[in-house]
Image (tube, rainbow, N blue to C red):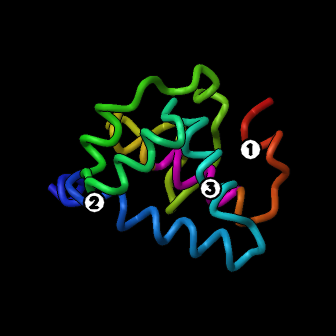
Amino acid sequence: MKNERVFKMSFASVYLHYITKAEKKGRTKEEVDTVICWLTGYDQNGLQQQIDTKTSFITFFDEAPSLNPNVSKITGVICGYRVEDIKEPLMQKIRYMDKLIDELAKGKKMEKILRE
């Protein structure tokens, strides 16, 4: 199954791409961290630990303190799929994160990205 390959990828390797994408558009690593922490419930130390240990996406989301209660407000298309229609729970969480980083890179205001 092709999703299995994505699930086993190191979160840290993708995290570097998130930072690069955001910085190319004038955003910061701190903003990337804010978005990821908002989604997953990690604090900065917990996030850094996941990066340092190079955990897989499976472990990253399994160990996440709690998904933000406003996660259902994340809607739209990412990689050709509507995030709200993705059936596989782990893939949906990954795509939520992709969508938030995409919004950050597109210059959306932080209040809107964080669904405030």
Question: In the current view of this chain or complex, which residue is farthest to the top?
Answer: 69
Q: Secondary structure at mark 3?
A: helix
Amino acid found under the numbered disc labelled 1 = Ile
> Where's residue 28, x and y in %?
70, 65
**Earlier sequence position, callout 3 versus callout 1:** 3
Amino acid found under the numbered disc labelled 3 = Val
Judge from the rendering whether residue 65 lies leftward or rightward of residue 43; answer left or right.
Answer: left
- Image quadrant where one finds the N terminus: bottom left
Q: Secondary structure at mark 1?
A: helix
Q: Secondary structure at mark 2?
A: loop
**Earlier sequence position, callout 2 versus callout 1:** 2
Callout 3 touching callout 1 (CB < 8 Å)? no
The span picked out in magenta is: 95-103
Q: Nearer the viewer, residue 116 or 82?
A: 116
**Position of 63 relative to 36 (above/below):** above
**Earlier sequence position, callout 2 versus callout 3:** 2
CA distance for labels 2 and 1: 24 Å
Q: Residues within 10 Å of mark 3 (few under 14, many from 20)?
A: many
Numbered tag placed on residue 32 in the rendering: 3
Callout 2 touching callout 3 (CB < 8 Å)? no
Which one is closest to the eye, mark 2 or mark 1? 2
Callout 2 touching callout 1 (CB < 8 Å)? no
Q: Which residue is mark 2?
A: 10
Q: Residue at x 72, y 37 (%)?
A: 114
- Image quadrant where one finds the C terminus: top right
Amino acid found under the numbered disc labelled 2 = Ser
Q: Residue at x 45, y 62 (%)?
A: 15
Q: Which residue is mark 1?
A: 113
Q: Residue at x 52, y 48 (%)?
A: 97
